[in-house]
Amino acid sequence: MEFKELPPVKEQIMKCVRCGKCRSVCPTFAEIGNETAAPRGHVFMVGMLRNGVVEPSQEVYDRLGNCLMCEACSVACPSGIDIHELNAAARSYIYEKNPSLGKELIFDTMWTRPGMLKTSVRFMWLAQKTGLQKLGRSLGITKLLPGDLPKAEKILNSVPYFPARSELDEVNPARGEKRYTVGYFLGCATNLFYPEVAKATVDVLTRNGCEVIIPNDTKCCGLPQIANGKTETARELAVHNVKIFNAYDFDYIVTDCASCSSALSHKNMEYLLGGLKIEDQAFAFSEKVMDLTKFLIDVLDVHPPVNAKAKKMKVTYHDPCHLANAQGIKEQPRELLRRIPGVELVEMKEANRCCGGSGTYSLTHYDISMKILDRKIDHAMLTGASKLATCCPSCTMQLRYGVERSKWQADVVHPVVLLSQSYRQAKAVQAQEKVK
Amino acid sequence: MDSAAIRKELVKLLGKDKVLTEPLDLMYYSYDSSFLTQMHPADPYAVVFPKSTAEVQQVMRFAYENNINVIPRGAGTGETGGCIATEGGIVMELSNWDEIVEIDAKNMQVIVRPGVIHAKLNEELEKVNLFFPPDPGSSQMCTVGGMVANNASGLRAVKYGTTEQYILGLEVVTPTGDIIYTGGMKARCIKNVSGLNLTKLMIGSEGVLGIVTQIRLRVWPKPKARGIAMAVFDQLDDAPATVLEIYQGGLLPSGIEILDSSAIKAVNEFKPEINLPDCEAILLFEVDGNPPSVEYEGEQIKEIAGRRARLVEWSTDTKRMAQLWEGRSVTASAASRVRADGTRVFAGEDISVPLAKVADTLRAIRQLAAKHGIQVVNYGHIGDGNVHTAPVINPEIPDEVERVMQLVDEIHLLAIEMNGSTTGEHGVGAVRRKYAELEHGLAVNYMKKVKEVFDPKGIMNPGKLF
């Protein structure tokens, strides 16, 4: 469909009355402080692009690209404009007119091929383990990287050698009586960077009567592509994933990654595949998709075993934008944490404000991203928590870097990891008591 | 001096980080909330971001020497094109200069720079049990400097009045580059009748006399209790009649707001959880004070409003009150939701009429809207006769644009005919200046003479007010 005919572009631009409500909630605007970074400014510029007042140039892309896509503005907008969708559509339109070899290599070639992605991460592991990364920094070689990457490469925390997929079976039977057949959408970042989260997810689900199937051919959810103007590639990935998962008879499709569940949601499927032949299949797929914490609370109603000897810990929770803003899921992760024996949940100020990571934003806009991150970490530290919980691998990566920058003694964890640990600890305590 | 040379000189003066010069960036400063700038955006020559009085003075002196227009701007949430370079010039963006210089709780006042956001100021004041009472619907985004320039008010003007009642003194950089202090150079007093009242002259002057760089504000003790009554009416006329009966009953709520059936629909579309009842009109009464008096006034409102209303809901629950107040606050923007292929436009949206004529005015607006075939959403501060009308149109259809312009012209003329004003709180800007002589007659000449004293070259926000 032509850019001008896309529903958000055609219907929503005119609805902006420039009231500025979006300015008051935008993390990037708060740091940059001028109208070029205000969400209403983005709407205005997309309008100029649509009307042909400005050309689809790299200069316009750069301004629209100064946005985290955190969706805080879309939630706050009294006129009901999906500002992030407008922005994504415009980026895609500009990209089509200004293709970049680098982006094609990253988002079309590498990110769409799980094997190639795995190999790239393996190189990162090798560089970290052999000290090449440190050597590169001390010799100034990393400074040769493009854009903000010389500064941002530090954000990549310690990379594991084995991805989750190599340590998990494709089919994981339910323990005890089977309740549901669950398709686990194992996202790229969880798979490659945080295999412990994937293992905890499978552990907790199987303990609670779920047969967990991890389809081998799963590809990227498409969100990085949307954010980087590669909507067509995101569309192809969505079609692939819909077909793969629909080939099974799943009761639910669960993911522990906020960005993935947002990308696979009905709303996003409508954005990518609405009006196409595959629309019905896509909607049937997205109807089954559910964030892990929501599934654990609303469907499984999990209650880990009571454990009087559970280690006491103060935990604060950071809302991933793609969970809280994109899907309105705020209570379930908190409720899950409250149910874990020993956990005391303490709220931080502005818990529902972006951490500045936002997938690739921290790599392309390092300095602003760090300002947003520092504000987040300051609030988190003030709670006195020893653990900072969140449900998104991109947030985890950013927050771990923030914790390190601030020299704060805290772990950044997914709630499911704490939950899985609580099951194992309770079992160990029971075993000890039996021995006694 | 051409605009490229102006940009170069400004960069020399302030440094490149405090000046926008790229044509693409300047486009972002071509609009505010007005329909005028939606249809006719106007790019400035440059945008500057001074963060000290000295920097403001430097820019003003440069502009004065070179005959360049200067247009002060806060958060750009105005509805009249007041902060737009409609006749060319340098936009001076002050919303980044957001320092709370001092909270002088002992003297019940606070000193701020112009860019402080209204809601953030009240957040800080709350920590010492104080508050700055005017409550514009744009509280989360508007700046105190913008409130001074427009003499803003909002939802609590009924009891607490407008911004002007809280300004004790100002620091102003004049168009010639002088720095003056109104309300006494060193004063920290509250009462002061010394000298001509230049503070009052500056308030509401919409940036045509100078740049306000510091504000000394009077603040009040924060009331200990609050309650909101929602009265539901099946006849629109019953709502203004009830407002008069509340006053006659010896009550002075802190706010009295009206939403008509379209506004109710818009709010429910935006936040379904607010769940406003389907009816012809809703009145929201806010009362505040000490707990027993709030309860007493709540009972009285229930009794008086209940004579005409189908239902009166009284709440002191924090969550419910926040919902109702937020619903009313965002009606201005949420009004667009009543039409899928349309948007509300800010034009003819702020008339003020005598209390006894509110019912007639609302009826007349509906008739005018029907005559021009334009859907309107009515809401506003009915407690002080300030009616907000939101025409909802498709601005991409030229015929609708033409019809809405006729409608808003007639609404402005209606206000004058009703012994009212074309604007109660949003200001004149570039949009309503054509009504100045009709409203003020010969007084407009004296306004122009006052401006000449401050701004002999006419460079300060030209094309606004008159």
Image (spheres, rainbow, N blue to C red):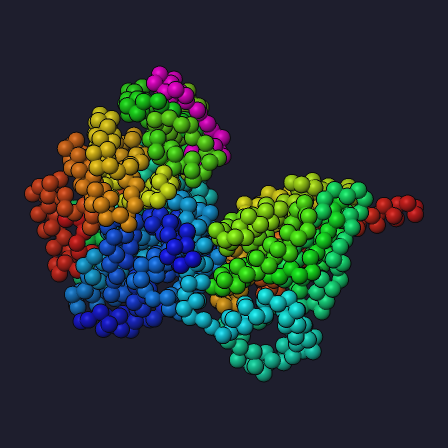
| Quarter containing the N terminus of chain B | bottom left
Spot occupied by residue B220 in the image (x, y as percentages of width and height): 37, 38
**A236 or B459, which lies in front?**
A236
Magenta stretch in the rendered image:
B301-325
User: Furthest residue to the right?
Assistant: A435
- Tell me how many marks there are: 0
Q: Please, is residue A376 above or below residue B189 in the view?
A: below
Which residue does the image show at 17% across and 31% down from the upper left?
Answer: B418
Residue A334 on the magenta span: no
Outermost residue toward the front? Answer: A277
Horizontal placement of A98 versus B242: left or right? right
Q: Residue at x 35, y 30 (%)?
A: B261
B130 with respect to A217 (left or right): left
Q: Name the quadrant containing residue A88.
A: bottom left
**Residue B314, image quadrant:** top left
Residue A286 shows in this picture: no
Horizontal and vertical percent position of residue B140: 40, 46
Residue B306 in view, yes or no: yes
Point 59% across, 47% down: residue: A284
List x then y, in percent, for residue B255. Answer: 35, 32
Q: Is residue B130 left or right of residue B433?
A: right
Q: Which x, y percent locates residue A383?
A: 60, 50
At 48% across and 66% down in the image, what residue appears?
A365
> Residue B90: which quarter of the image?
bottom left
Residue reaching furthest to the bottom: A139
